[in-house]
Image (tube, helix red, strand yellow):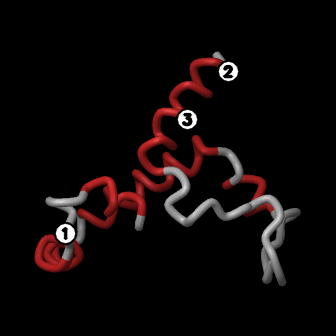
Amino acid sequence: MEAVRAAIEKQVLSLTGLALGGVDFENPPGDPGLFGPQSVIWQVHRDFTPMLCGGVSALLLQMLHPLALAGVWDHSNFREDMIGRLRRT
């Protein structure tokens, strides 16, 4: 099962990964802020599966609000650059 999960993660990351220029999330430079690498937030979000589930859920929830959907429709280039838009989300 781990091999299947890794294959799916690799495929999705090939579309969306490194959108932030290869930031090292394990060892960020400078002050880690309120929630550093040992926090629960980092423990949950270090795995790709919960991040994907949360991201898709957030996008679907955003689409339920008519004003948010109208704003994206009127002011976004998602129709021409879907992958780029996804990377910036």
- Number of other residues with Cα within 10 Å of mark 2, as a class: few under 14, some 14 to 19, many 20 or more: few
Give, as a three-letter code, the residue at label 3.
Glu
Query: What residue did someone put label 2 on?
Result: 2
Query: What residue did someone put label 1 on?
Result: 77
- Number of other residues with Cα within 10 Å of mark 1, as a class: few under 14, some 14 to 19, many 20 or more: few
The residue drawn where x is 32% and y is 63% is 85
Residue 9 bears which disc, if any? 3
Above-or-below relation of 44 to 62: above
Q: Position of residue 38 (x, y in %)?
A: 88, 63
Tag 3, which secondary structure? helix
Compared across the picture, whether 7 is left or right of 46 comes to: left
Give, as a three-letter code, the residue at label 2.
Glu
The residue drawn where x is 55% and y is 35% is 9
Residue 25 bears which disc, if any? none
Tag 1, which secondary structure? loop
Tag 2, which secondary structure? helix
Report if the CB atoms under discs 3 and 2 are less than 8 Å apart: no
Q: Quadrant of the C terminus?
A: bottom left
